[in-house]
Image (spheres, helix red, strand yellow):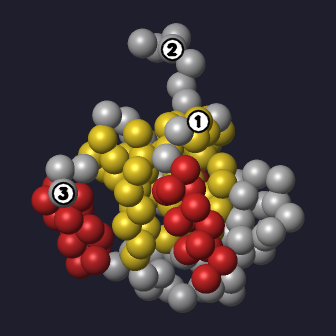
């Protein structure tokens, strides 16, 4: 297992929803959870950015717990967390590294920029270090 090449599998529909979310409000980081089954991300669960900021995001704890409940109720696995970077590169910021509390989750960062070469990128963040993982769109 340790030597298996890791990829993040995601449905085309989920990718499209993430881009819609990121572009809907290009001045505030969008954020939310990603769910799915058998390791395939297929559900996007948008949350409110409690900071209403273009440079950071936070999901209020009550909303986070409600989203986790919904994930369980719909028999979905919690597979990841997403947010957008309205400005600049869609790679983890120092704050993203510091606040990545789920080592098993995929962190997806979206750019609303229509010219971005990779508008959706995936990272695994463990102990403050990020590793980019290839996305397999199915
Ligand atoms: Zn970020």
Q: Is residue 21 left or right of residue 111?
A: left
Quadrant where the N terminus is found in the figure: top left
> Quick one: label 1, few (<14), some, or many (20+) residues within 10 Å?
few
Residue positioned 86% across, 64% down in the render: 115
State the mark number for residue 30.
none
In the image, residue 117 lies at what x, y percent? Answer: 83, 53
Query: Where 1 sits versus 26, above or below?
Result: above
Quadrant in the picture for residue 113: bottom right
Which residue matches tag 1? 136
Above or below residue 43? Residue 59 is below
Say which element carries label 1.
strand
- Residue 75 picture location, percent across and down: 17, 50
Residue toward you, 39 or 53 = 39
Determine whether the beta carbon of the residue marked 3 sits less than 8 angstroms from the nearest atom of ligand 1: no
> Which circle marks residue 74 in the picture?
3
Q: Position of residue 82 (x, y in %)?
A: 51, 60
The residue located at (71%, 71%) in the rendering is 112
Give the mark, 1 or 3, whose residue is nearer the N terminus. Answer: 3
Tell me the residue at 50%/44% (across/down): 10
**Alpha carbons under labels 2 and 3: distance apart:** 29 Å
Residue 96, can we see it?
no
Q: Earlier in the sequence, mark 2 or mark 3?
A: 2
Q: How many marks?
A: 3
As measured in the structure, the alpha-carbon distance from the residue carrying label 1 to the one carrying label 3 is: 24 Å
Which quarter of the picture shows residue 55? bottom right
Question: To which residue does mark 2 refer?
Answer: 4
Residue visible at 62% across and 66% down in the picture: 19
Lower sequence index among marks 2 and 1: 2
């Amino acid at each position: 297992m340790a030597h298996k090449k890791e990829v993040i599998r995601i449905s085309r529909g989920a990718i499209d929803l993430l881009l819609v979310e990121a572009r809907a409000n290009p001045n505030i980081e969008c954020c939310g959870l990603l769910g799915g089954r058998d390791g395939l991300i297929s559900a996007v669960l948008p949350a409110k950015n409690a900071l209403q900021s273009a440079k950071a995001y936070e999901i209020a704890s009550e909303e986070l717990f409600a989203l986790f409940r919904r994930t369980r109720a719909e028999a979905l696995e919690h597979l990841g967390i997403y947010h957008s970077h309205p400005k600049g590169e869609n790679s983890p910021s120092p704050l993203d590294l510091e606040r990545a509390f789920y080592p098993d989750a995929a962190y997806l960062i979206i750019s609303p920029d229509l010219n971005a070469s990779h508008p959706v990128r995936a990272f695994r963040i463990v102990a403050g270090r990020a590793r980019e993982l290839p996305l397999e769109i199915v």
